[in-house]
Amino acid sequence: MNLEIITPDKKVYAGVVDSVILPGNNGGFQILKDHAPIVSTLAKGNLVIEINGKKETFVVDGGVVEAAKNKVLVLAESVA
């Protein structure tokens, strides 16, 4: 599935991933291929992407995620 992570300043990440683990305001959750459409707010925490068994972690400072039709868009306040 395609993932984009965007902050007000720049596009942090754009590419194909196998899964995304996000810090939701009510707890963490994972998005996989063919996930049902979802819109959720994000808390400050780790956003972990997995590509071919390798994980990469970004620290987001809150934001919003929207997923539909194997496209995931993360609009983050900031990313470290």
Image (cartoon, rainbow, N blue to C red):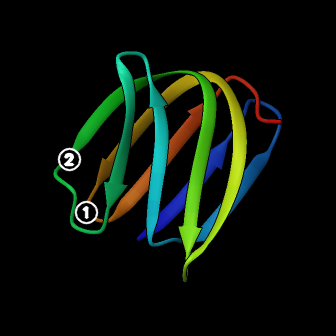
Residue drawn at x 55%, y 83% as measured from the top left: 52
Gap in Å between the C-alphas at discs 1 and 2?
A: 7 Å
Quadrant hosting residue 70? bottom left
**Percent from the top left, x then y, of residue 73?**
48, 47
Q: Measured along the vertical axis of the image, is residue 32 above or below residue 7?
A: below
Amino acid at the residue labelled 2: Pro
Quick check: 77 left or right of 19? right
Quadrant hosting residue 58? top right
Quick check: 51 left or right of 1? right
Residue drawn at x 74%, y 49% as measured from the top left: 11
**Percent from the top left, x then y, of residue 3?**
52, 60
Residue drawn at x 77%, y 35% as measured from the top left: 79
Q: Measured along the vertical axis of the image, is residue 64 above or below residue 57?
A: above
**Percent from the top left, x then y, of residue 6?**
67, 42
Q: Measured along the vertical axis of the image, is residue 34 above or below residue 57?
A: below
Q: Which residue is mark 2?
A: 37
Quick check: 1 left or right of 60? left
Quick check: 44 left or right of 3? right
Q: Are marks 1 and 2 in contact (CB under 8 Å)?
A: yes
Q: Which mark is residue 40?
A: none
Q: Which mark is residue 69?
A: 1
Label 1: few (<14), some (14–19) or many (≥20) C-alpha neighbours in 10 Å: few
